[in-house]
Image: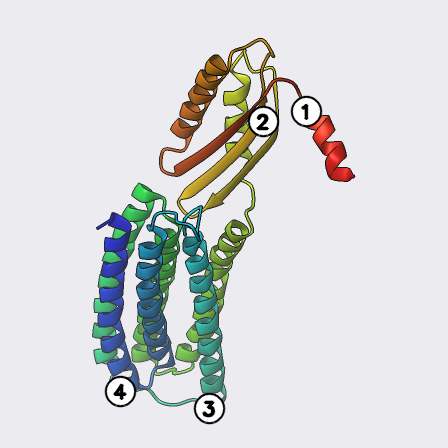
Amino acid sequence: MRLEKKATVVSTSVAGVLVLIKMTIGIMSGSIAILASAIDSMLDFLVSLFNYFALHSSEKTPDNIFNFGRSKIEPLAAVIEGVVISLSALFILYEALVKIVYPKEMRFISESIYIMVTSFVITFILVAFLKYVAKKTNNMVIRADAMHYQTDLLSNGAVLFALGAIHYTDEYLIDPILGVAIAFYMIYSAVPIIKEGILMLLDAALQEEDREKIKKIIESEPVIQAYHYLQTRESGSHIFISVHAVFNISISLYDAHLIADRVEAKIREQFQDKKTHILIHMDPYDDSEINEEEEEW
């Protein structure tokens, strides 16, 4: 089993345990902040489960229907996760505002503190593990999952702070006010996840610095006289690159092919953490202007 899939199994299991303990103490205490955290953990469980099946499907080899594979499932999963985070944040915001208008006394505060300390420690270990996997694999789904659980870690810390403050001050408004803050932070954290996923689904080009690396590699080959139609896109853990390279008309196809292979190898070295697919079209002359005129026509 791939490390990414193992990470989703771990995160799903942890989220399931956290849902049980948070929901129990949240209902007993009546804390909006804890219930919000429990709902978020429930969504974490569902999203992590979805991520497991998304990674499983993205691994399937290309076939007659999906010629380029199913790697776009990964950014799709990231977008769904970001939307789920945003929707849960809106629900938390609603519940917090209701409690500000209709305040209620909290119960079992000491027990709630113990539960949230346990939840904080478990989530901290999970975030450290997911960050390790994300750094090692550079997988978009795992990076989104790590960011998601990192917001949980911060919200758990904030809930702990609120419970401690309520315990010593008996000011119960701290709980819903903190719920509002958590909701806005969750939305703030979800925006980059959704944005990156949508850009990938729309086949946005690689970052400028990555395109510059590709250009320098092509330009470093003295036999390549010019190049045009450099196109790039990223799809989950896959990168697709295509370019037209202009060679002297007298060069043999064999020699041109060797140079193209050398360029491909150098480009792959720049993206070792990705599965890179490169297509170099070898031109005997620069036909960029002719093709541009045909496109305009």
Q: Residue reaching furthest right?
A: 297
Q: Is residue 177 visible?
A: no
Residue picked out by circle 4: 28
Is residue 242 or residue 167 the one in the foreground?
A: 242
Residue picked out by circle 1: 287
Q: Position of residue 61 (x, y in %)?
A: 34, 47
Is 143 left or right of 23, judged from the image as shown?
A: right
Nearest to the eye among marks 2 and 3: give it: 2
Residue 35 location, quadrant? bottom left
Q: Residue reaching furthest top?
A: 250
Relative to 102, say whether 186 is above or below.
above
Label 3 vs 4, first from the N-terminus: 4
The amino acid type found where label 3 is placed reads: Tyr
Is residue 186 or residue 291 the one in the foreground?
A: 291
Label 1 vs 2, first from the N-terminus: 2
Q: Report the Cα–Cα distance between label 1 and label 2.
A: 9 Å
CB under 8 Å between discs 2 and 4 = no
Residue picked out by circle 2: 244
- Provide the secondary structure element on which disc 3 rests: loop
Q: Report the Cα–Cα distance between label 3 and label 4.
A: 18 Å
Q: Residues within 10 Å of mark 4 (few under 14, many from 20)?
A: some
